[in-house]
Image: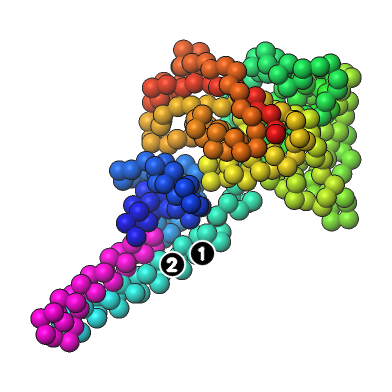
Amino acid sequence: LVPGFLMAATGNWRRLLAAKGSALMRGLMQARLPLRRSYPPHIQAGLNKSRMQKIMVGVLGGGGLLVLQGSSVTRAAKAEGGDGGSKGGTPWSLLGGVGLGLGALSIGWYLRQHMSGEEDRQARWHEGWAIGRTHFHLNEANPKLTRFSKELFPGDEKSSVLVPLCGKTHDMAYLASMGHNVVGVDCVPKACSEFRDLLKETYGAILSLIGDGAPESKTSYTVWRGSLGSGSVTYLLGDFFSLCAGRGTSPTGFDAIYDRGALVAIRPIDRIEYVATCREALKPGGKILLLALEHDPFNNGKLGPPFSVTRADVDALYAADFNIKELDREDRMSIEPVWKKKGTSYFDEIVYVLEKK
């Protein structure tokens, strides 16, 4: 009960619900106690939607304490030879029971509306694109990709490459220009539109609509496809988490996955599902080039986005199914001083190559 109250008070109670076995202790460790006023970023957006939800979570905790208080009063009265109720224990218990009931209903409603739901998961990205919060995109191919692409493609053969949460990155054009068949997935229509414009204006390539995601089509995605150099680019507009759970015709069996900013962008509560989707999409022996970040909390207490993903996190998520090799670790504080202004004392970018067992 005590860990539950602590995690509810810090906004981390969803970690408790998601934890299993040894993950429970890890969830408690990541709750970042002691208590603080700000909520963790992966649920802050949802909680901010309604002050009533916060009040009801407090009612739940208060109701539980009232029940305990009523029980204590009743036991004390009985120990003194009374009937318990006459000493006031029963009213405390009844009031606490009402609080527990209201709090439980509130949490049940919240979970139904927001617990890792597709709409809630995508809302932050849609909002970010709507207000132009896309500074994470570079104006060229990522230097880490150009430097370590041979780790993904040791030979010269053409490969199929998946780019989760691709946005409008130049990296897909770079991979296609190397002769690979690239498939990017993103849920934001504005991202897809701007990428098509980028491809046309910068690379002279045109993506054509070949599937609209309608019920009668064979895919749940809106599909755009075109050629670039000796390779190709396919853009799947839709929820990445549905890639391996759609109508059975979504592409799988990829040779490689390039993750520049996906794992660090999603909520920590969604990481297990994200990694499972990547694992299912990748063929045995396939590789992932993963660019992760490590940092301490920002000025406002938030841990992201972009979220810190430590080596321990990478091991916990991938080690069961992948061989993990760290390729590079770079201090980005001097290169990107904005992170120091945000309050971090360190901000490292780490490159991993993961090979599916």
Is disc 2 placed on a helix, strand or loop? helix
Is disc 1 placed on a helix, strand or loop? helix
Q: Residues within 10 Å of mark 1 (few under 14, many from 20)?
A: few
In x, y percent, where is residue 115? 55, 55
Residue 64 is a magenta residue: yes
Q: Which mark is residue 104?
A: 2
Total labels drawn: 2
Rendering quarter of residue 290: top right
Rendering quarter of residue 279: top right
Q: What's the amino acid at mark 2?
A: Ala
Per the rendered image, the range of residues in magenta is 56-84
Residue 1 is a magenta residue: no
In the foreground, 321 or 16? 321
In x, y percent, where is residue 204? 85, 20
Is the C terminus in the top left, top right, bottom left or bottom right quadrant? top right
- Give the residue drawn at x 49%, y 21%: 348
- Give the residue drawn at x 75%, y 25%: 172
Asked if one can make out residue 80 in the rendered structure from this viewpoint, the answer is yes
- Give the residue drawn at x 44%, y 49%: 24
Q: Which mark is residue 109?
A: 1
Is the N terminus in the top left, top right, bottom left or bottom right quadrant? bottom left
> CA–CA distance between discs 2 and 1?
9 Å
In x, y percent, where is residue 298? 41, 30
In the foreground, 338 or 149? 149
